[in-house]
Image (spheres, helix red, strand yellow):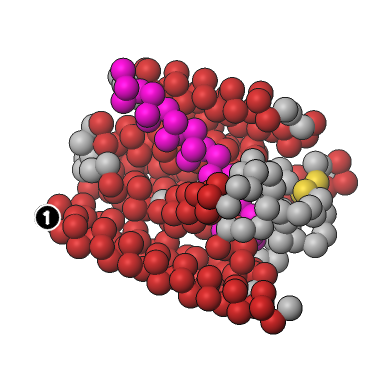
Amino acid sequence: MLAWLLRRRHVLPMDHPNERSLHATPTPRIGGLGIMAGVVVASVFLADSTLLPVMLGAFALAAVSLLDDVRGLPVRVRFLAHFVAALVCLLVLGLTGWSLAGVTLAVVWMTNLYNFMDGSDGLAGGMAVIGFGALALAAWMGDAHGLAVFCAAIAAAALAFLYFNFPPARMFMGDAGSIPLGFMAAALGILGARQNVWPWLFPLLVFSPFIVDASVTLARRGLRGEKIWQAHRSHYYQRVVLLGASHRQLALAAYALMLAVAALAFVLLILPQSALWVLILSATTYLLIFRAIDWRWHRFRNEL
């Protein structure tokens, strides 16, 4: 499907470089359709009472995001769709009261941060392959075979997309891919936790390369009084490229980090008593990485 789309790139919505971009030439941003096509096929065979609300929420967000990719939608419309999808999905999964409110906000944040982190060739696709692949393995180990196969299908669809998106990218994911992927990462993580397939910390660790970068960047921009909803290039992954690394170098380094924290998540899954040490080790790892990037960034700025 993606190869067919590329042959018709002259009629596809293009991602033109802007103040947030790390790319220099217009690139088709419709690759998310290929990922979601794979998810649709898996859904036909795997839909059940627990997976169906996640699937329907992802499809609804993909449709809204595709419209945004093609024609553009007001921010308030997009956010309303994110909130409604998260709220309805969590209600069907059985959350109520204050937990429903708090977790809804968490799902909306994950939905959007995945989009924020989709700004370098191969990055979001690689996170999907490794992240959903880790969820699939953990679900299989926990005898949640339907959940395992669905997560594996998402990872496989993302791997097919990565063929076209690995640096130098011929196609971008677009909101039609990044928004539903972020939603499914959050919703499936919650579903597995509620079914006692994994502890709550497991999916947070697996997707922590995106969660930590986006959350720390948002907090720092807010503390500096910046308008956090405006496009920017303040993410740590963006600064790595601005400091001179190629998209390929960033992608490979990010994959190594993703695999490392996924391995820590499995240590937590197999040895629950190691939770404190896993948290300390992962937090120390991120602190050292961020401090190194900050040091290089300030030195770079001072040399200008």
The overriding secondary structure of the stretch rendered in magenta is helix
Q: Is residue 229 left or right of residue 188?
A: right
Q: Position of residue 37 (x, y in %)?
A: 59, 37
Using the image, determine if residue 67 lies above or below residue 178: above
Residue at x-position 49% and y-position 38%: 109
Q: Where is residue 132 in the image (x, y as percent from the top left)?
A: 42, 48
Q: Is residue 18 left or right of residue 45?
A: right
Residue at x-position 53% and y-position 72%: 293
Q: In this view, does 105 lie to the left or right of 170?
A: left
Q: Any magenta on residue 105?
A: yes
Name of the residue lying farthest toward the bottom: 303
Q: Where is residue 82 in the image (x, y as percent from the top left)?
A: 55, 27
Using the image, determine if residue 48 lies above or below residue 159: above
| Quadrant into which the C terminus falls | bottom right
Name of the residue lying farthest toward the right: 10
* Residue picked out by circle 1: 273
Which residue is more in the foreground, 179 or 167?
179
Q: Is residue 9 visible?
A: yes
Using the image, determine if residue 11 lies above or below residue 238: above
Residue at x-position 65% and y-position 25%: 76
Q: What secondary structure is found at the residue carrying circle 1?
A: helix
Q: In this view, does 39 lie to the left or right of 173?
A: left
Q: Position of residue 53 (x, y in %)?
A: 43, 22
Part of the protein shown in magenta: 96-124
| Quadrant into which the N terminus falls | top right
